[in-house]
Image (spheres, helix red, strand yellow):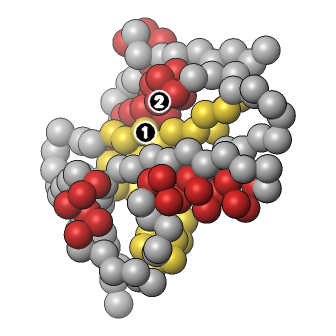
Amino acid sequence: MRVIPKKLFFTKGVGRHKHELQSFELALRDARIEKFNLVSVSSILPPGCPIVTREEGLKELVPGQIVFCVMARNSTNEPNRMVASSVGCAVPADGSHYGYLSEHHTFGANAETAGHYSEDLAATMLATALGIPFDAERTGTSTRTSTR
């Protein structure tokens, strides 16, 4: 039996609590995916898989359903510690080829910086899979993260 995703949607959530498990649950609720059994998978976007809105994607799911996901997750118990995580996506121009999703987890970077970095990772993985030279720093898309 082949299990190939038919659609993809992105979501995000933030949870704050003194206990890590509770903060994770709150983040899942904020992302509106707490009612599903999430199974992490690696980072391949199937050929021709459309990206839909979160609302459209959620309409097709039922509570308790097993849902495959590429998840970026980060946490800290340090007050005022800046944390970020992000999933980047690279979709090939040729819809018959697979794309890439990449997860990035960082400390000391904001959401925008983490987002650019994960997109660069996905683009690099796709380009190298297609045999296309790609240098994120030369294309101007590379983003450096700094930790303090």
> In terms of depth relative to the viewer, which is nearer, 30 or 107?
30
Q: Can the viewer see residue 43? A: no
Percent of width and height locating residue 38: 51, 71
Percent of width and height locating residue 3: 35, 79
Question: On the picture, is 99 further left or further right than 87?
Answer: left
Does the residue at mark 1 contact the one at mark 2 (Cβ under 8 Å)?
yes
Residue at 40%, 23% in the rendered image? 134
Percent of width and height locating residue 87: 47, 42
Q: Amino acid at mark 2?
A: Gly
User: Which is more N-terminal, label 2 or label 1?
Assistant: 1
Residue at 81%, 31% in the rendered image? 79
Label 1, secondary structure: give it: strand
Q: Quadrant of residue 33?
A: bottom left
Q: Amino acid at mark 1?
A: Gly
How packed is label 2: few (under 14 Cα within 10 Å), some, or many (20 or more)? many
Q: Can the viewer see residue 78? A: yes
- Quadrant into which the N terminus falls: bottom left
> In terms of depth relative to the viewer, which is nearer, 28 or 144?
28
Percent of width and height locating residue 25: 61, 62
Q: Which residue is mark 1?
A: 88
| Extreme residue toward the front, this view | 17
| Extreme residue toward the right, this view | 78
Question: On the picture, is 23 further left or further right than 96?
Answer: right
Question: On the picture, is 114 further left or further right than 54?
Answer: right
Residue 79 vertical placement versus 141 (above, below): below
How packed is label 1: few (under 14 Cα within 10 Å), some, or many (20 or more)? many
